[in-house]
Image (spheres, grey):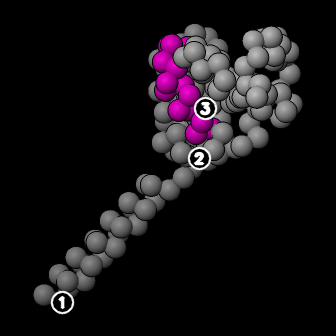
Amino acid sequence: MKDFKHTIKYLALLSAVLVLFSCSSNPEKSGKLLDSGVEFYYHAQYKKAFALFKEALDADEDNFEAWFWMGNYFENTHDNVRSIECYTKAIELNPNYADAYANRALSKKNLHDDAGACSDWKKAAKLGKANLDDKLEWCRRNKVGDK
């Protein structure tokens, strides 16, 4: 009976370790999956890219670049609400991610949130994102975001 109790305790401990191990973050794996996903994305194989971006996030939910690329996927499929959610998560994880601000601005603009778009373009420009002059000029010309 004593051996049975030890076996049960051992199995319970082993199960707990396996659960913790399977839930741990794996940034290296996530990065490799993301790189593969980006390759598929650039070759317009969006469904495969999406699956790899999802796997990358499963491996490391703090991979801000995977959130960014997932946002790109949703923007490409015209799901601006979900793209904004993904870009916002990328920004939460890396507040200095200028590309995420710039892309989120496009999704906001598509949803007619001009003030939100202009705010994000201004933040992206402040963080060093280039080639936003036409966007910022549109904001100035239309007095969007001016108080």
In the image, what residue type sits under mark 1? Lys
Q: Which disc, if any, is residue 2?
A: 1
Query: Residue 76: in sight, yes or no?
Result: yes
Quadrant containing the C terminus in the rendered view: top right
Instruction: Please rate how many residues cluster around mark 2, counting C-alpha atoms within 10 Å: few if below 14, some from 14 to 19, many from 20.
Output: many
Q: Please say if 52 is above or below 111.
A: below
* Residue at image point 54% right, 52% down: 25
Nearer to us of marks 3 and 2 is 3
Residue 104 x, y percent position in the rendering: 64, 25
* Res 71 → quadrant: top right
**Disc 3 designates what residue?**
87
**Disc 2 designates what residue?**
62
What secondary structure is marked by label 1? helix
* Residue at image point 36% right, 67% down: 16
Q: Which mark is first along the chain, 2 or 1?
A: 1
Q: Which disc, if any, is residue 110?
A: none
In the image, what residue type sits under mark 2? Asp
* Residue at image point 43% right, 62% down: 20
Q: Are marks 3 and 2 in contact (CB under 8 Å)?
A: no
* Res 40 → quadrant: top right
